[in-house]
Image (tube, helix red, strand yellow):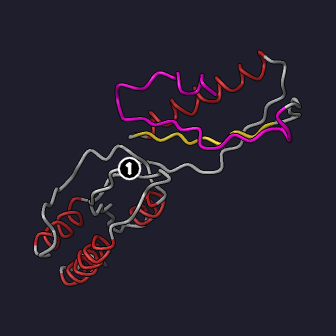
Amino acid sequence: MQNVYGIARHADALTRLNVGRVEAGSASNVVADDAVLELEARAGTNDVLDYLTERVDRVLEHAGAMHDCELSTETVGRAPRVDSDDALADVVGAVASGVPAVETVRPSAPFGASEDATYLMRRVQENGGLATYVIVGTDHPSGHHTPRFDVDEASIDIGVDVLTGAIGRAFADDLAS
């Protein structure tokens, strides 16, 4: 498992590897017959995600071989990177600028992650539609994907105001057809 964390990061995009779950054995004094390891790899580009996936597979394969263990891997999720359409992102930004509770509007930001929503965005774009990814920023001192993550309820109202306004503007500007 430690060798997964030793995989070199890539200069072309942000990357993250996290082993989030390890389960093995039934008692502390018994050598386990098998083990399950669940991990997540994320990257800012699809090519760099492929790089990480290949390296993780190689590390796990060699760790199994080193200990004369059988190994099987299964990919249960993968989120590709996709770019927002500028026209729709501009609409969201313009609407957000008019929402009183919004303090700062950034037309884009170095997000560097992949999300499940990218599947939906890609499908919409493949079928001729426009898609954008919107982040409603808020103060999360412990960060996302941690046991102490807590949602600032005020940010939910802000997000609803921005998104409903953007949908209305997109239809009014005939971007939704």
| Left or right: 160 in relation to 1 | left
Residue range of the region highlighted in magenta in the rendering: 1-28
| Left or right: 56 in relation to 33 | left
Q: Is 170 or 16 nearer to us in this picture?
A: 16
**Quadrant of the snapshot with the C terminus:** bottom left
Report the label total.
1
**Quadrant of the snapshot with the N terminus:** top right
State the image quarter where residue 94 is shown. bottom left
Q: What percent of the width, then of the height, locates residue 152?
A: 33, 67
Instruction: Give the residue at mark 1.
Output: 143
Q: Is 145 or 41 nearer to us in this picture?
A: 145
Taking the spot 52% from the left edge, 23% from the top edge, the residue there is: 7
> Tag 1: Cα neighbours inside 10 Å, few (<14), some, or many (≥20)?
few
Of all residues, the one furthest to the top in this rendering is 66
Q: What percent of the width, then of the height, locates residue 139?
A: 27, 57
Label 1 SS: loop
Q: What percent of the width, then of the height, locates residue 113?
A: 40, 46
**Type of amino acid under label 1:** Gly
State the image quarter where residue 168 is shown. bottom left
Whether 69 is among the magenta residues is: no
Taking the spot 53% from the left edge, 21% from the top edge, the residue there is: 6
State the image quarter where residue 44 is shown. top left
